[in-house]
Amino acid sequence: MLYFNYIYMKNLPENIQIKFYQLLEKETSIEDFELFLYENNKLLEEKLEQNDYFQILSFNYNKKDSIYEFEELLKSIMGIDDFYKWKIIKLSESIVSKKIDMLIGLNKLCDIYYKTEGKFVPKYILGYQDDLQDIPKKDKYHLYHSDFLKTELEGLEEFKEDIVNSLIELID
C-alpha cells in the first residue's frame, strides 16, 4: 500500500481538499477527479513532496476498480479523521437544512459513529436513532395506513427540535 503523510492535505487549498472528499463520497467520478488533478498539477507539485506528487499523477486511473484502490491512497494522503470530520459537518448541515431526510441522516451519522468507534459523533446521536428507529422512512410512507403514519410521524416531531439543535452544536 502506498503511504503519504496526511499533513500534506492541510497544506492544500480548501477547494482541492473538498475535491478529494467528494471523490470519497462518490460525488465526482474518478475520471473527473483525474482531470481536476491535471488542471491543478502545479499547485499539487508545490504542496506535496516530489515522490508523493509523482505517485498521485502516475496512478492508473483507467484500470478496473481503480476507484477503490485510489480511495485507500486518498485516505492515507489526507488522514481519515479529516474526511470524517468533513463528512459529519456536511451531513449535519444537510439534515438541518432539510436537504436530506432526518432519519436517513441520523442513520448515516450512526454509521460514522461505529466506523470511528465514537471518535467524532457524540453517543447521544445513537439515542436519537434508537428513539426513532420504528418511524417509517419517507420512501416507505405509501406502505402505511395514514392514521398509523400520522401517529408515528408525531414521534419524530417530538424530537426534531432537539436533534436540530444538537446538530447545530456539532457543526459549530
Image (tube, rainbow, N blue to C red):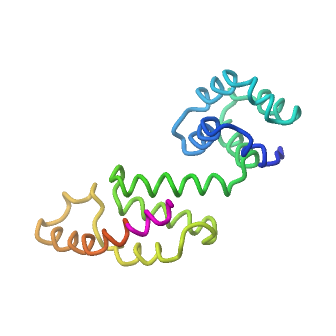
> Residue at 35% across / 72% down in the picture?
162
Task: Work out whether residue 105 can be spotted.
Answer: yes
| Residue 146, image quadrant | bottom left
User: Which of the two residues, 71 or 50, is positioned nearer the viewer here?
Assistant: 50
In this figure, what is the number of numbered marks?
0
> Residue at 42% across / 59% down in the picture?
105
Residue 27 in the image: state x and y as whole percent. Answer: 51, 39
- Above or below, 123 against 3 in this view is below
Task: Work out whether residue 1 can be spotted.
Answer: no
> Residue at 76% across / 48% down in the picture?
76
Q: Is residue 170 left or right of residue 152?
A: right
Q: Main secondary structure of the magenta part?
A: helix
- Above or below, 96 against 127 in this view is above
User: Which of the two residues, 7 or 104, is positioned nearer the viewer here?
Assistant: 7
- Above or below, 169 against 68 in this view is below
| Residue 139, image quadrant | bottom left
Which residues lie in the magenta part?
165-172
**Can residue 171 be found in the magenta stretch?**
yes
Residue sticking out furthest to the right: 51
Residue 134 in the image: state x and y as whole percent. Answer: 31, 73
Residue 158 in the image: state x and y as whole percent. Answer: 26, 75
Residue 170 in the image: state x and y as whole percent. Answer: 50, 65
Q: Is residue 87 left or right of residue 144?
A: right
> Residue at 35% across / 49% down in the picture?
99
| Residue 30, image quadrant | top right
